[in-house]
């Protein structure tokens, strides 16, 4: 079985949002076109409490996009984003949702960030996504969404580590930084992941 994993396609990551990914909105028609071609569609949702410690606002004197040590892990300090129950945390309005069978929320523990849809950044706690996919007999995972250099990248690394055959759909993602995206693609390739275009699936 082939699963399409939609990472964090939420209002706050679109142009105009709190943590906008440049041209992030351009992936939505691509993702909508892809969905009917999969056995299973699963989504992740970045879902932070207002006091999440990945927010610069929780560290007076620290600048947004600077880095700190948070409980032993290097943490980028983000603008407040995807706060539970706010419009910014909702899935993008233009995203087709009827085919999404399950939603895995992450980033709820205020003490640790969670880029991957599978584990928190310390690999301390699982979301259950890997076991869910295995329970549905999924062997191949195709990843789309935002942002390519953070949550998409970390999700792909974990999918590979969990032994899924893993594909990044390049035209169904956008990055926060172009340089970060190039590094991510190199590492995905080195770890055995494949980088494809949506046209190969349609
Ligand atoms: C993300 C930074 C912070 C993402 C989430 O979805 O890529 N990036 N939280
Ligand atoms: Zn976040």
Image (spheres, grey):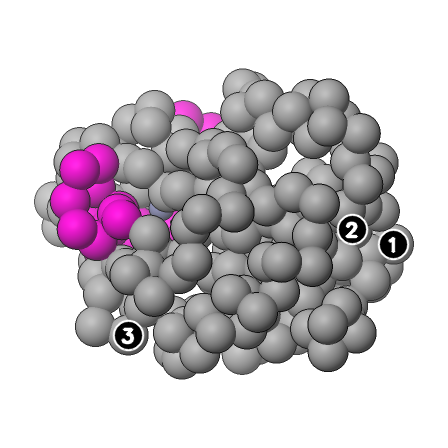
- What secondary structure is marked by label 3? loop
Q: Residue 195 location in percent, x, y?
A: 77, 68
Tell me if I can see residue 151 in this picture: no
Against 68, is 10 above or below? below
Residue 166 is labelled as 2
Could you give the CA–CA distance between mark 1 and mark 3, rounded to whole angstroms?
32 Å
Q: Secondary structure at mark 2?
A: strand
Residue 192 image label: 1
The answer to which of marks 2 and 1 sits earlier in the sequence is: 2
User: What residue is disc 3 on?
Assistant: 15
128 sits left or right of 75 in the view = right
Q: Which mark is residue 122?
A: none
Decide if ligand 1 comes within 8 Å of the CB at mark 1. Answer: no
Residue 153 on image: x %, y %: 61, 55
How far is the residue under mark 3 from the one under mark 2? 28 Å
Q: Residue 68: give x, y in percent of width and height.
A: 36, 44
Give the magenta part as a residue range.
70-90
* Front label number (2 vs 1): 2
């Amino acid at each position: 079985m082939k699963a399409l994993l939609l990472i964090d396609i939420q209002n706050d990551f679109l142009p105009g949002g709190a943590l906008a990914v440049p041209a992030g909105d351009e992936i939505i028609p691509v993702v909508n076109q892809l969905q009917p071609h999969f056995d299973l569609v699963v989504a992740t949702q970045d879902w932070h409490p207002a006091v999440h410690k990945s927010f610069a606002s929780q560290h007076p004197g620290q600048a947004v996009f600077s880095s700190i040590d948070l409980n032993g892990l290097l943490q980028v300090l983000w603008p407040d984003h995807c706060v539970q129950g706010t419009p910014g945390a909702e899935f993008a309005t233009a995203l087709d949702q009827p085919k999404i069978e399950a939603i895995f929320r992450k980033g709820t523990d205020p003490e640790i960030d969670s880029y991957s849809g599978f584990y928190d950044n310390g690999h301390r706690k699982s979301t259950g996504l890997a076991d869910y996919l295995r329970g549905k007999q999924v062997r191949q995972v195709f990843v789309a969404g935002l942002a390519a250099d953070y949550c998409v990248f970390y999700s792909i690394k974990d999918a590979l580590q969990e032994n899924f055959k893993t594909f990044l759909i390049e035209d169904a993602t956008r990055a926060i930084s172009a340089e970060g995206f190039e590094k991510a693609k190199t590492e995905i390739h080195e770890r055995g992941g494949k980088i494809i275009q949506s046209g190969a699936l349609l």
